[in-house]
Image: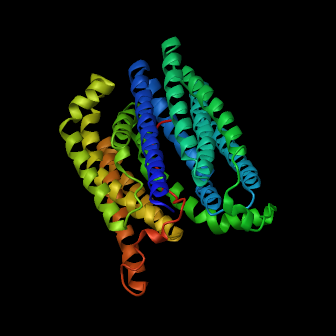
Amino acid sequence: MTDRSARARLWQQATLVGYRALSDLVGKGAQLLIVVVAARQLSREDFGVFALGSTLGWIAAVASDFGIQLHVARSVAQGSPNLEQLLRTWFRVRLWTSTAAVVVLSAGLVVTGATPYTALVTFLLVFVYLLNGLIEFLYYVFRGSSRTDLESTLTIWQKLSALVGAGVALWWNPTVVALGLGLVASSGATLLYALRRAYALPPLETQSMLPRPTASLASIGGEFRRDVLPIGAGIVLSALYFRVDLFLVELWRGTVEALRLFPAAVLAVALPALCRANGRGPLTRVTMLVTVVGLAVTTGLWFTADAIIGWLYGERYDVAVPVFRILLLGFPLMSFNYALTHQLVGWHRHGFYAAISAAALAVNVVLNVLFIPERGIVAAAWTTVWTEVAVSLGCLGSFAYLCARSSPGPRAHITTATWPRATPEPVEHSLVM
């Protein structure tokens, strides 16, 4: 490869990375604005239902995927010999898992005796998230095919159209039902177009050198148990420990207090989300980078929390400021854990990731049960911080164990060489569409 071609390839990669960062910026900004507009246009009761429905939908989307998209992206990147068959097989599985989520949701709404209005709103919001989960699955196919440009373009289009749809719906009729319908229209159109583009992807050069896969039910089941289940367990447990507090607050303190936690949680995640870089450098450098940036973001937002909450959500959500500041204390740890869990999954240490997430969920539930009945959302916020501490300790313990067993030295495997082409990402704690 000549110097000119090497520079051209480097420039192409830099352009793709920059475009991906831009799409993340636009997407996170649009997501945050949807919540802000909803907080200002909806009644407190409607916004409380929106917060709970959004959280339930997010968990349903994560559970219905259960690590499938990560497995498919890795298979595509490693040169699956039949991309179309791979896509058709696993997209069909994702349709079945999404349908199962709808059935479970419907049964849950009947058992809990939800009012018709609450049931309709919850169903709409969960349906939006399930559609977005299918879109995300296709985005991972693009990522594995080295077509992040398609992913970035569709991300920008989807998030901006969702923002426009939400704004128009709330202007026309400021209810959660109208908001849900606007979001369904945006997600449905994006899904159809993304599916069309996914089936039009050309095969990778390495695909012709590999044997064709079988698509029997037994082979899919074995593949799921071997490659998908460990990742999915860690992701679902991680999603549960991050948002189970919202449901517990609603159970013991009521919907109105639960909704006060929601804006603070959304803001704590959405504003600094871009600071968690998907670095491919050595683990120590990446960890230091995201942690230092996390500390800087936390410091800046700590001193401006009053102004930010008031400006975005209005005076009636001033009560969320102390909660927001508490959640900010956990952000450097969240960034630190993001890098460590990223490397664990990249090393195919799925069992470690799942065990850490299970332990974190146990810590989270115990602390919430002990303290939420008396202290409400403040206890829930502190529980999130201590849960991140537990995750950090679990990750550090796992790395100490792995390094002690490695040869020739404790740093032998902490290099970029072990990072696969399509590195799976742990669940991102996003609370909005």
The picture quadrant where one finds residue 80 is: bottom right
Q: Nearer the viewer, residue 327 or 6?
A: 6
Q: Is residue 218 above or below residue 39?
A: below
Position of 123 relative to 140 (above/below): above
- Above or below: residue 352 compared with residue 113: below
Q: Residue at x 34, y 61 (%)?
A: 286
Q: Quadrant of residue 288?
A: bottom left
Q: Would residue 142 be found to the left or right of residue 38 on screen?
A: right
Residue 250: x percent and y percent? 43, 38
Indicate the position of residue 184 as horizontal and vertical percent values: 61, 28
Q: How many marks?
A: 0
The quarter of the picture where residue 397 lies is bottom left
Q: Position of residue 266 (x, y in %)?
A: 38, 38
Using the image, determine if residue 106 lies above or below residue 242: above
| Camera-nearest residue between 81 and 65 | 81
Q: Is residue 235 left or right of residue 87?
A: left
Q: Nearer the viewer, residue 90 or 383?
A: 90
Q: Residue furthest left?
A: 303
Q: Is residue 169 left or right of residue 91?
A: left
- Residue 330 in view (yes/no): no
